[in-house]
Amino acid sequence: MKLAFFGRHGSFNYTHIGGTNSLVRRLSTELINRWNFQIDYIIYGNSCDNEVTHFPGLRSKYYQRLDRALESLKDYDHIVAIYFPPNDLPAYLYYRTKQLRKNHFSKLHQTWPDSTVIRKLMFTINRVISINSNSFAVSPRLVQSIKKWSHRAELLWPPVPSNYFVNPSQKSVSNKTRVTFIGRIDVGKGVLETIDIFNALADRPEIELAFYGMYWESDPKAVQLHQQLLEQTNFNYVPINFAEYSSHIEKMVQSVLRDTDIFIQPYRKLSSTIDTPLLILEAMASLCAVITKPYGNIPYVYGKSPCLIDDPHLCEKATELILSANEWLPSERKRIELQNDKLKFDVSSVAEQFVKSINF
């Protein structure tokens, strides 16, 4: 099958780090390796037309103009739309009207906007034109919202490779409680809360802290926080280049999570990430306890746990929980292992669900 993932520049990229980028890249790799798919990333809005082969079976095809990108879609059996700005939607919908008998079209819904108006607009767009395949969504609440206008809505967990998954005996042992943050330097991701928690724990010899941060150079606030993190000496800070995905970084994240007891990600709002945060799933696969907030479907994904903190005194509550980790961490790991088996978000299971859905 020839499959295209399609969207505007900035919505996804093979070489970038982040939830949508990792979701599409991992799913593509599995589809190529197991089912011999031919997959192209069709990305418009670029500075020039270009084509890059990442490995046999996977290319990125870059276009300056939307019309040229749309014209290229006629060569594919199935197109999965990622994101378009509102002013580009009419052209895409018009093209889809002409091609419904030739191509199958899907939409991948990844985010839950804060604005009720924007959410309603997002979920009603596809009423304009009949879709001829399944829509996919990364969280149960997105699926339920899509089903209000279409019965063809499938849950597609952000996939996690098999080598992230461990059992309790495979977790490394330390005489310290190892607490880690990994993620984009973004206030919406709870970076300021994480810094407060880390500073509160900095003088505790039984705690080991590590902060791995990605930042956009175009974001002044992120650059400012990055500089402050470089200058502070309370805990270990490791900057990661957002635009430099590599197998080395993938292995580094796997290693860090395997050597982490408690992963911290206290989101201020889930709209700052995909609606089921991939890093939470990766941490769960690595049997890390995850301190976060019970927003969206996180309680369903992570399960019932004292690590889900909905309290105005988050810093104090999280600090107390971390300091008492020896009392609850072993049982929490066993619970997370059962939760992982229930959800089945490993890349093999996710890819099988995707193939089953597009071959309806």
Image (spheres, helix red, strand yellow):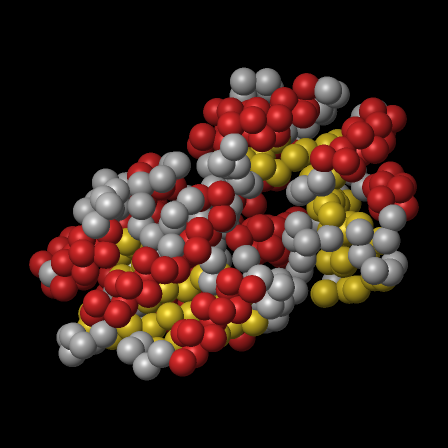
Work out whether 152 lies above or below 219.
above
Q: Quadrant of the C terminus?
A: top right
In this rendering, would 185 be left or right of 7?
left
Q: Nearer the viewer, residue 342 or 127?
A: 127
Whether residue 329 is visible to the viewer of this picture, yes or no, is no
In this rendering, would 62 be left or right of 206?
right
The residue sitting at 78% across, 37% down in the picture is 88
Work out whether 321 lies above or below 126.
below
Work out whether 237 lies above or below 254.
below
The residue sitting at 73% across, 58% down in the picture is 58
Work out whether 330 lies above or below 252.
above
List x then y, in percent, for residue 27. Answer: 59, 51
Q: Nearer the viewer, residue 68 or 217?
A: 217
The residue sitting at 84% across, 28% down in the picture is 94
List x then y, in percent, for residue 284. Answer: 34, 54
Whether residue 126 is visible to the viewer of this picture, yes or no, is yes
In this rendering, would 321 be left or right of 266?
left
List x then y, in percent, for residue 1. Answer: 75, 43
What is the count of numbered marks? 0
Q: Quadrant of residue 171?
A: bottom left
Q: Nearer the viewer, residue 258 or 326?
A: 326
List x then y, in percent, for residue 151. Answer: 57, 19
In this rendering, would 288 be left or right of 296?
left
The residue sitting at 31% across, 46% down in the picture is 293
